[in-house]
Amino acid sequence: MSSFGDRSARILTRSIASTQTWLNDTLTSAGRANSAFIRRFRNTHARERCVIIGNGPSLRNTDMSLLRDECTFGLNRIYLMFDELGFETTYHVVINRHVVEQCADDFRKINAPLFTTAPNRDFLDGATNTAFLNTIVGLWPYFSPDASRGVWEGYTVTYVAMQLAYYMGFSEVVLIGVDHRFAVSGTPNQLVESTGPDASHFDPRYFPKGFKWQLPDLENSEVAYRLARQAFEADGRRIVDATVDGALTIFPKRSLEEALAK
């Protein structure tokens, strides 16, 4: 049973999110238009399946051709694989400010609806087909069932994609490329500069030499993933992990072929 303090923290978190949303969505015409754009996606995929594509090296051992007719979420720099795939993802999500700042021109060229957070207007303001999500800042980890009101970043862009998938009504989410391990180590969330070809992602060009990025926070991202599993299963939905040899243990494991079986 949660304590009074725990419940108070949750209430305050929701209160902060609600106030921020109201301010952002009502005081400017751009805010109102952005809010309306996000609401267009509510329950548009009810009872459907989607695949969230991580960026781990395991993608190189995954039969990506199986995704050609699936609804997909691409994350961060997955577009480096588009030419090889022969198709683009249905939706695209990028959150990290450093990634957006260094790759803004690339993200402006994305054809799919692009979801990012409000602070990234600094780099993507005026970009077409782009949703700027409010970021929930509070005292308690949070799974947002209503992305139009805001999302909790959860230390990983994958978690934001899960909240969007829930908002869109998907009943099943399949994960691939979420390896949950990295070739580098250090203080979580520390900003570092890449020293050479990237061995932590599917393409050595992903974070090339000189690229600034933040080290992963695997422990806190697991807190977020547990919240996502709880939220989906409480509503009769599910998330399954079809990552090849992935290290994440939060979700039920399936092969991609099993997960996509009709």
Image: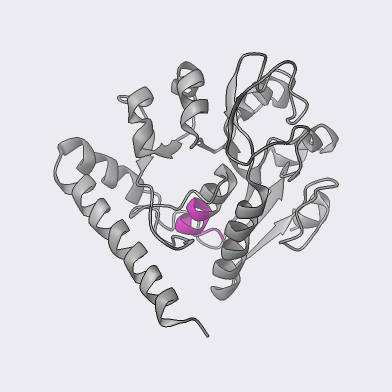
> Could you say which is closer to the camera, residue 232 or residue 183?
183
- Note whether 79 is above or below 252 in the view shown: above
* Left or right of 244 on screen, residue 171: left
Q: Is residue 137 visible?
A: yes
Residue 200, x across and y down, in percent: 75, 31
- Note whether 102 is above or below 10 in the view shown: above
Residue 193, x across and y down, in percent: 62, 21
Residue 173, x across and y down, in percent: 63, 56
User: Which span of residues is magenta-colored?
Assistant: 163-172
Q: Main secondary structure of the magenta part?
A: helix
Residue 170 is one of the magenta-drawn residues: yes
Quarter residue 15 falls in: bottom left
Going 48% across and 51% down the picture, which residue do you hit? 164
Going 74% across and 55% down the picture, which residue do you hit? 241
> Could you say which is closer to the camera, residue 151 or residue 12?
12
Going 59% across and 70% down the picture, which residue do you hit? 230
Q: Is residue 70 visible?
A: no
Q: Quadrant of the C terminus?
A: bottom right
Residue 205, x across and y down, in percent: 69, 17
